[in-house]
């Protein structure tokens, strides 16, 4: 998932910036058939940030702008428009935080090597040996 930060100040906030974020909601973008959650957040450390607490507090036009941007951003690369789950409706802060926690737990398990992964008996992340690389895709 990615975070889309909204702030009334001109300060650019990078996703790796350690400032505090307040999650307001999320959009469930469908990208190449997979859900790609886009968290809607504000910079809680910025004094100019509106006191929004949930996506319902955000002006509809602001959410529409974000939704439209994510729908079209890949068309510049010659790809089609993205679509959304939930008919494009933004989910509330509680739902978005649940998604973020679950996604983080999956990431943490992967980083801690607790997520087994194999494809037809071949480990997904293990270096491939010469025998494996010489097999045809049908043999894998």
Image: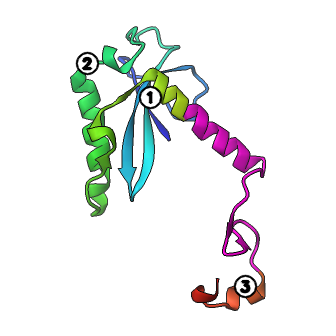
- Which residue corresponds to mark 2? 59
Look at the image and tell me in which quarter the C terminus lies: bottom right
55 in relation to 121, above or below: above
Q: Position of residue 56 (x, y in %)?
A: 32, 17
- Are discs 1 and 2 less than 8 Å apart at CB? no
- Alpha-carbon distance for marks 3 and 1? 47 Å
- Alpha-carbon distance for marks 1 and 2? 21 Å
Q: Is 71 in the magenta?
A: no
Residue at 76 percent of width and 69 percent of height? 126
For discs 1 and 2, the disc positioned in front in the rendered view = 2
User: Mark 3 or mark 1, which has the lower sequence index?
Assistant: 1
| Mark number displayed over residue 44 | none
Q: In the visual, does 91 lie left or right of 121?
A: left
Quarter of image, res 37: top left
- Which residue corresponds to mark 3? 132
Residue at 39 percent of width and 59 percent of height? 32
User: Mark 2 or mark 3, which has the lower sequence index?
Assistant: 2
Q: Position of residue 5 (x, y in %)?
A: 43, 28
Residue at 34 percent of width and 30 percent of height? 90
| Mark number displayed over residue 12 | 1
34 in relation to 135, above or below: above
Q: Which residues fall within the magenta stretch?
A: 100-128
Q: Secondary structure at mark 1?
A: loop
- Local crowd size for mark 2, using a 10 Å CA cut-off: few (<14), some (14–19), many (≥20): few
Q: In the visual, does 47 lie left or right of 101?
A: left
For discs 3 and 1, the disc positioned in front in the rendered view = 3
- Are discs 3 and 1 less than 8 Å apart at CB? no
């Amino acid at each position: 998932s990615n975070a889309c930060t909204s702030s009334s100040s001109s300060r650019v906030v990078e996703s790796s910036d350690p400032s505090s974020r307040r999650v307001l909601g999320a959009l469930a973008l469908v990208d190449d058939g997979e859900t790609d959650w886009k968290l809607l957040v504000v910079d809680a450390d910025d004094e100019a940030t509106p006191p929004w607490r949930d996506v319902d507090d955000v002006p509809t036009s602001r959410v529409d702008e974000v939704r439209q941007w994510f729908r079209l951003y890949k068309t510049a690369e010659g790809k089609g428009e993205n679509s959304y789950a939930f008919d494009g409706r933004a989910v509330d802060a509680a739902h978005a935080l649940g998604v973020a926690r679950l996604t983080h737990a999956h990431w943490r398990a992967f980083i801690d090597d607790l997520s087994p992964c194999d494809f037809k008996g071949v480990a997904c992340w293990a270096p491939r040996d010469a025998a494996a690389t010489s097999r045809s895709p049908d043999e894998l």
